[in-house]
Amino acid sequence: MKNIYHILNGDALKEQFPKAVSGELIVTRECLVDGNVQGNSLAELFTNRAKFLESYQEVPSGEYFKTTVPEITKIVDIPAGATIYCWFEEDLFCQVNFWFVLHLLAKKLSAENVYLVRPNKGNEYSFGHMNSDSLIAAFHQATLISDEDIQKLSKLWRFYQNENHDEMLEIAKKYSNRYNFLMPAIRAQIDRMPDCNGLGQPERSLLAIMNELKTEAFPPVFRLFHQREGIYSFGDLQVKRMFDELLKR
């Protein structure tokens, strides 16, 4: 169906996306919760992101510009007046990407046709645990994001970039009734800030798990971390980087 776009939180959702739901699929292939997010323009941001992500051995040179940038460009090129469904979960990983998407949409669209699709209760951090019928039900329960809300919520991206946490909290408080997932995600971001030992909550949690399990083996530590710190929804690459740094201390 023309002029309907679904901005998805990842390729996993694309693979399981219900065929009964019409529209063009765009995948947000980013992990803006991790690494350098500086850049006053998209070109500058892309350069910084590519450099950072390719510091992971698992990310081939040029991969970012090959697979991620084209999808972001599709968001920028969505025509005015289109109907847009943003499929994002409630964890920090997804929320940061969502704020960035809203930042892009706020620049060019009349937002009367922008909707948020959220996972059902019990799967707040994972569309992946939902079957096709549940995803269709979530689609039909999509909530309209008003133009005013998009303009306000899109500011979370710049505040995140600049670590303006007070401003982020103010937005979360103001919109807590309509978007109750904002405050937990923003508080999780604030908890990442280093303490007097240079550790944020994710690192402290990893250390506690390593001590509890009495192991320096990554797989069991990652599994328990994923269970306890679901609010972050970090992937194995992000957690492994933190894990390896802790082992060097």
Image (cartoon, rainbow, N blue to C red):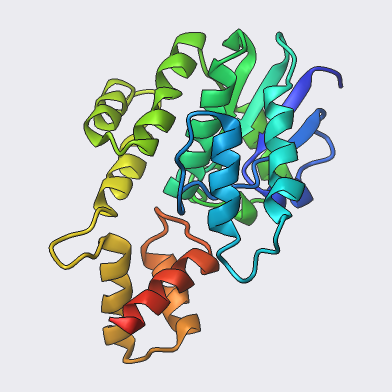
Q: Residue at x 26, y 46 (%)?
A: 190
Between 59 and 24, the residue placed more toward the observer is 59
Q: Is residue 242 left or right of residue 75?
A: left
The answer to whether residue 168 is above or below residue 149 is: below
Q: Residue at x 54, y 50 (%)?
A: 31
Residue 211: x and y in percent read 27, 85
Between 53 and 33, the residue placed more toward the observer is 53
The N terminus lies in which quarter of the figure?
A: top right
Q: Quadrant of residue 232?
A: bottom left
Between 14 and 33, the residue placed more toward the observer is 33
Q: Residue at x 26, y 77 (%)?
A: 208
Residue 46: x and y in percent read 60, 41
Q: Residue furthest bottom?
A: 214
Q: Residue furthest left?
A: 196
The C terminus lies in which quarter of the figure?
A: bottom left
Residue 23: x and y in percent read 81, 28
Residue 6 at least partly seen: no
Q: Quadrant of residue 174?
A: top left
The answer to whether residue 34 is above or below residue 137 is: below
Q: Is residue 174 left or right of residue 59?
A: left
Q: Residue at x 16, y 68 (%)?
A: 197
